[in-house]
């Protein structure tokens, strides 16, 4: 017989696959995500400060300054979550060390570009470095949102409140900076570029929106 799952079996007694049960929270790993998320916001500030040093294009510089101040807010918002759920923001973890090392290496890469290639090269390295840092930041918050949705109680409430304040800004940080990296590169190649990038002009906050903005960029040249 053909079961609802689509598997064929000749034995009618084979039970249907069990309904999905609520996930068992892995507390140690939830804490690890929160420590990494906090360290990402702290390292992100160092990345933005260096990116501002590297920025030449005034609108790009202004965007980096705005994102730096939002990243400072995210650190504060996460520390409030730590307070509410009884976690110590100073607790170290091996994962946290990795996040710190990555932020340090992005700062170092931008300094190298400034010294070796001058400001126009450093600006491109800055845009790419922010995309790398924000990829992790964006994923942390996606996971925090998922936890808030799937769990109950005080932790879920604290995470949801933090997520609601931060989520849209994280979308902008990632998708808009991806746009900046592409358009600044095109401009440096001597090709027509849309500055500020379509993602920013259209205030993109989703991956689908980013792809749509990219498709419309030729009309914006
Ligand atoms: Fe953030
Ligand atoms: Fe961010």
Image: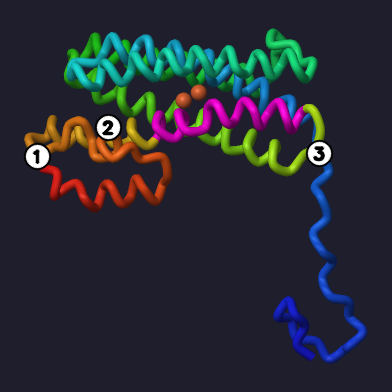
What is the magenta range?
155-174
As drawn, 23 above or below 50 = below
Distance (Cα) linking label 2 and label 1: 14 Å
Residue at position x 24%, y 20% in the image? 123
Between residue 94 and residue 143, name the one nearer to us.
143
Judge left or right: residue 180 versus residue 71: left
Residue at position x 24%, y 40% in the image? 198
Element class at badge 3: loop
**Rendered-image quadrant of the C terminus:** top left
Decide which of tag 2 and tag 3 comes sooner along the chain: 3
Residue at position x 24%, y 12% in the image? 114
- Figure quadrant of residue 171: top left
Magenta stretch prevailing secondary structure: helix
Category of crowding for the residue at label 1, using alpha-carbon neighbours closer than 10 angstroms: few (below 14), some (14–19), many (at least 20): few
Category of crowding for the residue at label 3, using alpha-carbon neighbours closer than 10 angstroms: few (below 14), some (14–19), many (at least 20): few
Element class at badge 2: helix
Which percent across, then down, holds residue 64? 33, 18
Residue at position x 64%, y 33% in the image? 144
Number of the label disc, if any, that sits on residue 25 = 3
Which percent across, then down, holds residue 140? 58, 32
Distance (Cα) linking label 1 and label 3: 50 Å
Q: Which residue is mark 2?
A: 181
Q: Which residue is mark 1?
A: 192
**Rendered-image quadrant of the N terminus:** bottom right
């Amino acid at each position: 017989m053909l079961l609802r799952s689509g598997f064929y079996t000749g034995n009618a007694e084979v039970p249907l696959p069990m309904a999905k049960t609520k996930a068992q929270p892995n507390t140690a790993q939830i804490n690890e995500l929160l420590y990494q998320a906090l360290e990402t916001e702290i390292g992100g500030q160092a990345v933005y400060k260096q990116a501002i040093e590297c920025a030449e294009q005034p609108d790009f510089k202004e965007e980096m300054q705005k994102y730096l101040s939002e990243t400072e807010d995210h650190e504060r918002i996460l520390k409030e979550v730590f307070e509410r759920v009884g976690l110590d923001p100073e607790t170290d973890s091996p994962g946290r060390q990795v996040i710190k090392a990555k932020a340090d290496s992005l700062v170092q890469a931008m300094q190298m570009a400034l010294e070796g290639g001058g400001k126009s090269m450093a600006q491109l390295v800055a845009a790419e470095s922010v995309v790398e840092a924000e990829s992790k930041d964006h994923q942390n918050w996606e996971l925090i949102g998922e936890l808030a949705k799937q769990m109950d109680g005080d932790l879920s409430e604290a995470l949801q409140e933090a997520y609601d304040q931060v989520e849209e800004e994280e979308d902008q940080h990632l998708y808009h900076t991806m746009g900046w990296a592409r358009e600044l590169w095109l401009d440096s190649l001597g090709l027509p570029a849309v500055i500020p990038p379509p993602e920013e002009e259209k205030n993109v906050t989703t991956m689908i929106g980013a792809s749509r903005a990219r498709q419309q960029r030729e009309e914006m040249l």
